[in-house]
């Protein structure tokens, strides 16, 4: 599974890369630290299966990036990973097409299980859960 990272924090991107490196059959294929670098074309030309996306970017909004990505490719999986736990952000992201919404301070460790679940689904060996609240 190919993953693209979009987060304005170099520290977070490095932490994610270290975490993801331990997951078999998962590869980080690119990264961006700001909205300008996170253009739809720049990301989608890498053909990611999953995009890990922060809401707050240096020069723009991750929600705008999410909307553009989903418009261009509705099937790409987008996991929001943010410092903003507010319900209105969750709702806005889910309405814009986010597949998951995780808060960095309390749910960072849920990224790997979510990716493993996605890999299992893509292999067709596990049916989707009946109640996926993410």
Image (tube, rainbow, N blue to C red):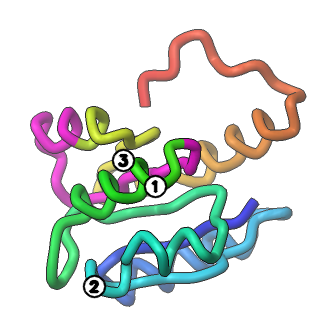
- What percent of the width, then of the height, locates residue 97? 37, 39
Q: Residue at x 27, y 78 (%)?
A: 35
Q: Nearer the viewer, mark 2 or mark 3?
A: 2
Q: Quadrant of the C terminus?
A: top left
Q: CA distance from mark 1 to mark 3?
A: 23 Å
Task: Measure the C-alpha gap from mark 1 to mark 2.
Answer: 17 Å
> Pointer 1: what residue?
72
Residue at x 55% of width, y 71% of height? 4
62 vs 98, left or right, is left
From the viewer's side, name the closer residue of 127 and 40. Answer: 40
* Residue 43 magenta: no
The earlier-in-sequence mark between 2 and 3 is 2
Query: Which dot, 1 or 3, sits closer to the camera?
Result: 1
What residue is at 87 percent from the left and 38 percent from the top? Answer: 123
Residue carrying label 2:
36
Residue 113, relative to residue 20: is it above or below? above
Residue 18: name its quadrant.
Answer: bottom right
| Distance between the alpha carbons at the discs numbered 2 and 3 | 23 Å
Q: Is residue 6 left or right of residue 20?
A: left
Write down the residue under mark 3.
102
Residue 85 among magenta residues? yes
Helix, strand or loop for disc 1: helix
Q: Name the residue rendered at 52%, 51% in the picture.
A: 73
Residue stretch in magenta: 75-92
Element carrying mark 2: loop
Q: Position of residue 1 (x, y in %)?
A: 75, 60
Residue 112 percent location from the top left of the image: 61, 53
- Comparing 6 with 113, the one in front is 6
Snapshot quadrant of residue 113? top right
Q: Earlier in the sequence, mark 1 or mark 2?
A: 2
* Secondary structure state at the residue bearing disc 3: strand
């Amino acid at each position: 599974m190919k993953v693209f990272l979009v987060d304005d924090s170099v520290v977070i991107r490095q932490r994610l890369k270290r975490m993801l490196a331990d997951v078999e059959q998962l590869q980080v294929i690119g990264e961006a630290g700001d909205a300008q670098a996170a253009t739809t074309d720049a990301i989608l030309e890498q053909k990611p299966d999953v995009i890990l996306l922060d809401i707050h970017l240096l020069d723009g909004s991750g929600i705008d990036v999410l909307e553009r990505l989903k418009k261009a490719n509705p099937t790409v999986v987008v996991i929001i990973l943010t410092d903003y736990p507010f319900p209105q952000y969750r709702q806005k992201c889910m309405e814009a097409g986010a597949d998951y919404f995780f808060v960095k301070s309390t749910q960072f460790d849920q990224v790997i299980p979510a990716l493993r679940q996605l890999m299992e689904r893509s292999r067709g060996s596990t049916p989707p859960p009946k109640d996926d609240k993410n």
